[in-house]
Amino acid sequence: MLTSDNYQNCISKSLNITSDITSDITNDMNKINKKHTSAKKTILVVDDEFDVVNAIKLWLQKHGFAVWGFVNPLQALEYFKKNSNRIDLVLSDIRMPQMMVTNL
């Protein structure tokens, strides 16, 4: 028979398990972050829409990346040519008015 005391015990155990799992995940993430404390990874974002570039840039920066954003693919290409050794990833729209991604 389920009494209010039994119900409270079940809820309490459930909350403790959830808290333990969350704590374990947080601890694991902290360990990973401590292991990877080297320089920020740099991402080049290219899209012909300013709002898209800005939203992606803000989100990536919030998550610890260094980000360069361009709405002009020709400028992005010039930047990449000069700084390719410092760019870890290029995130690009596939169709832009000035250049297709296959040309970038």
Image (tube, rainbow, N blue to C red):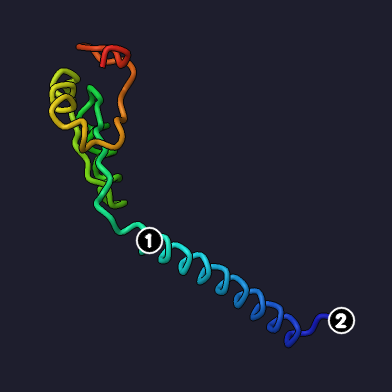
Q: Residue at x 67, y 79 (%)?
A: 13
Q: Which of 81/28 is in front? A: 81
Q: Quadrant of the N terminus?
A: bottom right
Q: Position of residue 76 (x, y in %)?
A: 17, 25
Relative vertical location of residue 84 with respect to residue 35 in this rendering, above or below = above
**Label located before the other in sequence (1 or 2):** 2
Relative vertical location of residue 61 with respect to residue 100 in this rendering, above or below = below
Q: Amino acid at mark 1?
A: Lys
Q: Which of 55/92 is in front? A: 92
The Cα atoms of the two marked residues, 1 and 2, are separated by 50 Å
Indicate which disc residue 1 carries: 2
Residue 85 placement, left or right of 102: left
Q: Position of residue 55 (x, y in %)?
A: 27, 39
Indicate which disc residue 78 carries: none
Q: Amino acid at mark 2?
A: Met
Which quadrant holds residue 104? Answer: top left
Looking at this view, name the residue that lies furthest to the right: 1
Question: Badge 1 is on which residue?
Answer: 35
Q: Which of 85/93 is in front? A: 85
